[in-house]
Amino acid sequence: MIISFHYNIGNQGIFHNSIMFVKKALFAVPNSKSLPIGLVARFSSATGDIGVTVNDKTGVATVKLQRAPVNSLNTGFLKNIESTLDSLEKEKARGLILTSGLPKIFTAGLDILELYNCTTESLTTFWTQLQSTWLKLHATSFPSVALINGHAPGAGCQLAMSCEYRIMLGPKYTIGLNETKMGIIAPFWFVDTMIDTLGPRQAELALTSGKLFTSSEALKVGLIDEEVGSEEEGVAKAEAFLSQYATIPGTARKLTKLMIREKTISNLVKNKDKDLKNVIDLITSAQVQKGLGLYLQSLKKK
Ligand SMILES: CCCCCCCCCC/C=C/CC(=O)SCCNC(=O)CCNC(=O)[C@H](O)C(C)(C)COP(=O)(O)OP(=O)(O)OC[C@H]1O[C@@H](n2cnc3c(N)ncnc32)[C@H](O)[C@@H]1OP(=O)(O)O
């Protein structure tokens, strides 16, 4: 007998931050021994869907980002991601596999429409949400794997780097912090995270050129940990990575992770306002607005 629970996770407009977990159905699946056992959830809202499947044997949650066409991160989607992480913390998930439910794209990074023609007020709301979602992901108490099954430029790379292990589907997709290519600057906490991941030498080379790495280049510099040929292989590798923690006491694991990440985390926590001011000054300048407009046009022209 297969036992399945359905999370009924509210539309953010209705439930705001309180994601509701409702045990809805208990049913038998005839003639099936191999169906995944687990908790299944779907988070729907106008600002993106987040599918959550929790394996009730291992406690590992697979979180699939789904905001067509390219999983770009706007305020609402970031808020949904944060709420999902909050729920996983509350439910004491034993691990996270963060991946995309869209073909070809992990996430296209920040929604450029949140930066273009923005007001100081809308940019403040957006950026504050980005800071908050990132802090949550970077400091999860459970181990995390990014299964990068598509392109991951800009903040897509930042999300992946905040997971503890990165597995990327090769060979077609690219990953990296490409801000300088767009004529903007990566915020200091993106830079810190890249230095933590690659070391200062490779981070400097990558950031100054806005390099988007292919999966094999990313593997060489340590931006990803494994390259796989199929999603199935990626899932198996992610599960194998997470399974090693089944025998490691959770508190010891979490405190060790936080000790290592503390400098980067507290740098943002202490300097949130300064970061926001930098972003407002840069993004609302006429020159950057013009550049963003041209960049958006170039994306649409393809
Ligand atoms: C001391 C001073 C300190 C100052 C600090 C300042 C800090 C400011 C920092 C700002 C940080 C930014 C980080 C970022 O994440 S910026 C965004 C980076 N992302 C990108 O550059 C990705 C751009 N997109 C692509 O390269 C491609 O779209 C893709 C992801 C490779 C997918 O290609 P594909 O061919 O499949 O799809 P299309 O290109 O046709 O795109 C489909 C539609 O989606 C729109 N699109 C794509 N990306 C974005 C995006 N990031 N935001 C919004 N919209 C996006 C695209 O325009 C198409 O729209 P259409 O259907 O209307 O044509």
Image: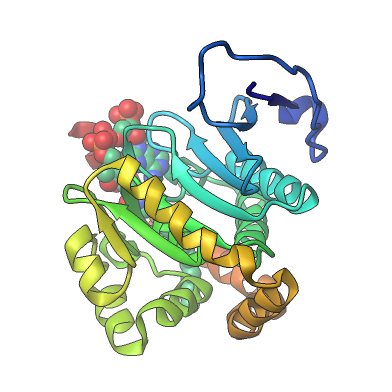
Number of numbered tags placed on the structure image: 0
Q: Is residue 40 visible?
A: yes
Question: Which residue lies most toward the top here?
Answer: 30
Tell me if 165 is positioned left or right of 75 in this view: left
Position of the C terminus by quadrant:
top left
Residue 95, compared with residue 10, is above or below; it is below
Residue 284 x, y percent position in the rendering: 50, 57
> 96 left or right of 28?
left
Q: Nearer the viewer, residue 292 or 107?
A: 107
Between 149 and 4, the residue placed more toward the observer is 4
Residue drawn at 63 percent across, 29 percent down:
40
Task: Locate the N terminus by quadrant.
Answer: top right
x and y percentages locating residue 23 in the rendered image: 80, 25
Let me know if residue 285 appears in the view: no
Instruction: Single out the residue that lies furthest toward the bottom.
Output: 201
Identify the image quadrant of residue 211. Answer: bottom left
The residue under the point 68% across, 59% down is 132
Where, by quadrant of the figure, is residue 30 drawn?
top right
Residue 222 screen position, x and y as percent: 30, 74
Q: Quadrant of residue 231?
A: top left
Q: Identify which residue is drawn at 39% across, 48% down.
A: 236
- Colour scheme of the rendered structure: rainbow
Q: Tell me if 221 is positioned left or right of 130 in this view.
A: left
Residue 15, above or below 196: above
Q: Residue at x 30, y 58 (%)?
A: 175
25 or 89, which lies in front? Answer: 25
Residue 86 x %, y %: 74, 50
